[in-house]
Image (cartoon, grey):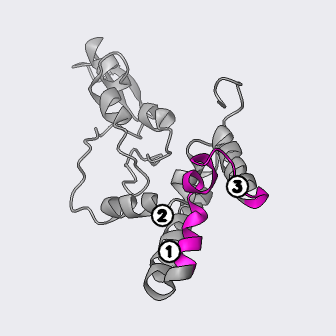
Amino acid sequence: MGRRLHLPRLHIPLAIAKRLEWGRYVALAVLAGAALFLPRQGESLNELEPFKTAITVGFDRSWPFVAYAVALLAASAFYYKFFCRFICPLGAVMSLGGRLRRFDWLTRRVECGKPCQSCKAKCAYDAIEPTGEIRYDACFQCLDCVGIYHDDKRCPVLLYEKKGKVLTPKGVFNAGTGG
């Protein structure tokens, strides 16, 4: 809806976004603790999920629940997947896989991040660091960066290679000549 209304996309600085992402872990811990130690309260606390709270019942709820769901929808209209990235306990569980991984499964080139910022600029989840490294705990596995990485029409490194040039942190050079 935000795109159709041409609403501006807000950008939260990476350092702040990283701090806000801890909100989903707090939500997960509270819900897990309540489920174990306070089951009755846990049933109420699961109202954190806006789809259960208001959307699936057609907003036929008391005003605080509807206001909460509308606020999250509004936040998501300006900031991509706001709830999923900063509050969702399921997002926390899924991101644990990224935190506990043993290897980097998404390939990167030496040029990724230095100088190329194409994947970073196109990553809707802000899951790519300025250095080109992928923040797996923020990555939702949309695989857009993988598509760009292998596409010689969208990846600047491959575009330059096709033209016989090399993209380096110091600029573009003709392949084989060094300058």
Q: Nearer the viewer, mark 2 or mark 3?
A: 3
Q: Position of residue 43 (x, y in %)?
A: 53, 73
Which SS class for mark 1? Answer: helix
Q: Is residue 123 left or right of residue 4?
A: left
Residue 89's mark? Answer: 2
Examine the structure image and report whether residue 153 is included in the region drawn in magenta: no
Looking at the image, is mark 2 or mark 1 earlier in the sequence? Answer: 1
Amino acid carrying label 2: it is: Pro
Residue at 33% x, 25% y is 157
Q: Which contiguous range is marked in magenta? A: 41-64
Residue at 61% x, 57% y is 53
Q: Position of residue 17 (x, y in %)?
A: 58, 56
Q: Report the residue marked by disc 1.
A: 31
Residue 61's mark? Answer: 3
Report whether residue 27 is seen.
yes
User: Residues at badges 2 and 3 in contact (C-beta under 8 Å)?
Assistant: no
User: Residues at badges 2 and 1 in contact (C-beta under 8 Å)?
Assistant: yes
Q: Nearer the viewer, mark 3 or mark 1?
A: 3
Amino acid carrying label 3: it is: Arg
